[in-house]
Image (cartoon, rainbow, N blue to C red):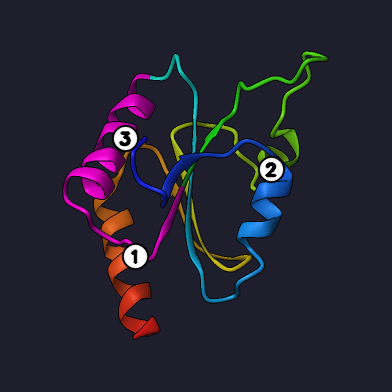
Amino acid sequence: MAKKNLFDLTSTADFVKLIQNPDQIIVLDFHAEWCGPCKKFGQFLNDLVVKENKYPSVMFVKVNIDEKDEENDLVFEDLIDKFKVTNIPRVIILKGSVVQQDIKGYNPTILVETLEKLITEKN
């Protein structure tokens, strides 16, 4: 991924750093490689952020729910539990550490509407 505000989460510690700024808008995209709707949503995010250069102040963070560490344990199990992710795609929009929107399934319209609202409030 070519943009610094669209990236794959590599550790829970990185997530903790992201939420330190109470004004930072963060989009968490919980996905898996085998999930068709997740791939479709991933392409939508890529087009939105990379091709259209929309929302440069927003951090778009991809969280692979199947990612495992060297001991074969799920890397993001704590985040999956924290946000009660039972289905994917699942998008959680945060402002700092506070959940602003919880989107279940493929629904880019709600994502864009929520981002527009949060950015308008911020300015």
Q: Of all residues shown, which one is farthest toward the right? A: 71
Is there CB contact under 8 Å for labels 3 and 1?
A: no
**Of label 2 and label 1, which has the lower sequence position?**
2
Residue 92 appears left or right of 117: right
Amino acid identity at mark 2 = Leu
Q: Choose top left, top right, bottom left or bottom right for residue 56.
A: bottom left
Relative to 73, residue 121 above or below:
below
Which residue is label 2 attached to? 79
Per the rendering, the mark at residue 41 is 3
Assign a secondary structure to mark 2.
helix
Amino acid identity at mark 1 = Thr
39 is within the stretch colored magenta: yes
Q: For label 2, count other residues whose C-alpha is less than 10 Å away and answer few (under 14), some (14-19) or many (20+).
A: some
Relative to 67, residue 18 above or below:
below
Q: Give the range drawn in magenta.
A: 36-60
Q: Of all residues shown, which one is farthest toward the left? A: 52
